[in-house]
Amino acid sequence: MDPKLWEELEAWAEDEMRSVNGQIEYLLKRAVNERKRSAPRDSKDRSTTG
């Protein structure tokens, strides 16, 4: 990971009283939930392969 990005994540995590890993998990969960909300209805079920 880019060291500058890591530093930014460390500072952000500290501001929000989280570990860096906790901050990354929080951000990933937000991104996944946002993607689910913005995805077209027919592409929401990605659990099946065709």
Image (cartoon, rainbow, N blue to C red):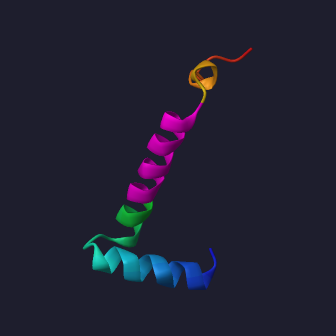
Q: Tell me, yes or no, whether the highlighted magenta stretch contains residue 6.
A: no
Query: Whole-percent x and y of residue 3?
Result: 59, 84
Dividing the image into 4 quarters, which one contains the C terminus? top right
Total numbered badges shown on the rendered structure: 0
Q: Nearer the viewer, residue 38 or 18?
A: 38
Q: Is residue 8 left or right of residue 1?
A: left
| Residue at x 42%, y 50% (from the top left corner) | 30
Horizontal relation, residue 5 to residue 18: left or right: right
Q: Give above or below for 25 relative to 8.
A: above
Type of secondary structure dominating the magenta stretch: helix
Q: Residue furthest left?
A: 17
In the rendered view, does 27 fall on the left or right side of 39?
left
Residue range corresponding to the magenta coloring = 25-39
Q: Position of residue 45 (x, y in %)?
A: 57, 21
Give yes or no for residue 36 being in the magenta stretch: yes
Quadrant of residue 44 within the rendered picture: top right
Q: Residue at x 40, y 71 (%)?
A: 20
Q: Return the x and y of residue 2 as percentages of the image width and height.
A: 64, 79
Using the image, determine if residue 27 lies above or below residue 48: below
> Where is the N terminus found, in terms of image quarters?
bottom right
Q: For the point 38% across and 77% down, which residue is it?
A: 12
